[in-house]
């Protein structure tokens, strides 16, 4: 068995762990039940892993919204972040390229000894999560399922909008999750490809961003959605603009917040939470594939932590 613990998506009998977590009776969600039975699901614990960092990656700065929520929800955890700023945006890339990029980044994060990985990118979650999940000896989660679950719970008129990159919206993965949770939900997807470059440019409150948002979101307003999933981790950075355009009655679902809660739940069940007793000198480390100084400046504008150094690496070596 590889690694200090092994996370297997599927148990021998054919049960999916996520299905078991959501199953009834509720004992499947209890810490005691999980502790007793985790070896049956090929999960072997090593206490030394608790102080290891959580790996987070995105195509650029968008994943910082997830990192920010991890800092808030899991203040004792160390984080290693990688932003693929040389190859942003992912939304226009092919599925094969997204999978290749994701595998390279995961190999880099594993070289840093991370205990879990968050794919903080909706496009990579849609295209690469399943492809990489079964080949890893550490848990890895995406950012789509948690947001879909909240949207299904929140919608009153069963009309849910999804905005994201061309790749994410075209994959239909949000609709798949939502329909599985509630077949009566109508899902209206809208690709908003200009949002990512606007965020990467730092135009978070610029009139141009307001104008672009107004044009993109009019269709969703016409469809009378009452819940809108921000299906790209860049989008929470322009949340106020999106809310202004959509109106206060529309519930915006932030996948960054929901993913941090899901990560906390997973680490708790696997007894991998850090106690904070051996906090690293630099608990948050940032790496990029290009434009390190620009990334650091942007990170300092949104994170509750002083980012003093961002290192550029050659991700093609991994």
Image: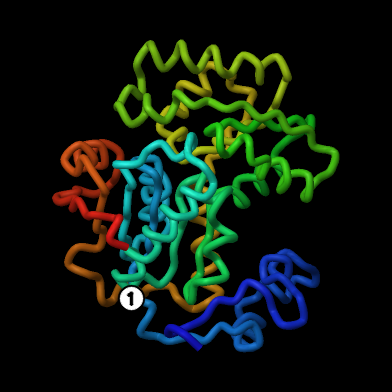
* Nearest the eye: 265 or 219: 219
Q: Position of residue 108 (x, y in %)?
A: 32, 64
Q: Position of residue 294 (x, y in %)?
A: 20, 36
Q: Is residue 84 above or below residue 162?
A: below
Q: Residue beneath label 1, please? A: 51
Q: How is the image coloured?
A: rainbow
Q: Is residue 280 above or below residue 234?
A: below
Q: Secondary structure at mark 1?
A: helix
* Nearest the eye: 41 or 130: 130
Q: Position of residue 9 (x, y in %)?
A: 63, 72
Give the quarter of the image for residue 24: bottom right
Name which residue lies at 69% across and 39% down: 154
Q: Is residue 55 above or below residue 32?
A: above
Q: Position of residue 96 (x, y in %)?
A: 52, 50
Name which residue lies at 47% across and 48% down: 97
Quarter of the picture holding the C terminus: bottom left
Q: Is residue 77 left or right of residue 314?
A: right
Name which residue lies at 45% across and 50% down: 120
Name which residue lies at 50% across and 64% down: 140
Q: Is residue 62 left or right of residue 276?
A: right
Q: Residue furthest right?
A: 184
Q: Is residue 281 left or right of residue 78?
A: left
Give the quarter of the image for residue 201: top left
Other residues around mark 1 within 10 Å, as few (<14) / some (14–19) / many (≥20): many
Q: How many marks?
A: 1
Give the quarter of the image for residue 158: top right
* Nearest the eye: 129 or 149: 129
């Amino acid at each position: 068995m590889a690694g200090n613990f092994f996370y297997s998506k599927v148990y021998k009998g054919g049960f999916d762990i996520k299905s078991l977590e959501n199953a009834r009776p509720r004992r499947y969600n209890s810490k005691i039940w999980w502790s007793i039975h985790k070896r049956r699901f090929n999960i072997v614990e090593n206490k030394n892993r608790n102080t290891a960092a959580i790996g987070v990656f995105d195509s650029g700065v968008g994943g910082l919204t997830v990192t920010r929520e991890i800092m808030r929800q899991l203040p004792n955890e160390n984080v290693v972040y990688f932003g693929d700023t040389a190859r942003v945006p992912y939304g226009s890339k092919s599925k094969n390229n997204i999978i290749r990029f994701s595998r390279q980044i995961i190999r880099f994060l594993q070289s840093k000894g991370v205990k879990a990985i968050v794919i903080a990118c909706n496009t990579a979650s849609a295209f690469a999560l399943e492809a990489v999940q079964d080949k890893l000896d550490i848990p890895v989660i995406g950012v789509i399922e948690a947001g879909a679950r909240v949207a299904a719970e929140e919608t009153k008129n069963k009309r849910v909008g999804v905005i994201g990159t061309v790749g994410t919206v075209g994959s239909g993965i949000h609709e798949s999750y939502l329909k599985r949770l509630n077949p009566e939900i109508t899902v209206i997807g809208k690709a908003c490809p200009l949002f990512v470059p606007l965020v990467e440019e730092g135009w978070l409150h610029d009139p141009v961003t307001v104008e672009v948002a107004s044009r993109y979101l009019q269709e969703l307003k016409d469809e009378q959605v009452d819940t809108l999933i921000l299906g790209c981790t860049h989008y929470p950075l322009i949340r106020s603009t999106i809310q202004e355009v959509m109106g206060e009655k529309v519930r915006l679902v932030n996948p960054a917040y929901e993913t941090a809660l899901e990560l906390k739940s997973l680490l708790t069940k696997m007894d991998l939470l850090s106690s904070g007793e051996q906090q690293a000198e630099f608990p948050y480390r940032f790496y990029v594939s290009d434009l390190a100084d620009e990334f650091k400046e942007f990170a300092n504008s949104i994170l509750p932590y002083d980012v003093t150094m961002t290192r550029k690496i050659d991700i093609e070596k991994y």
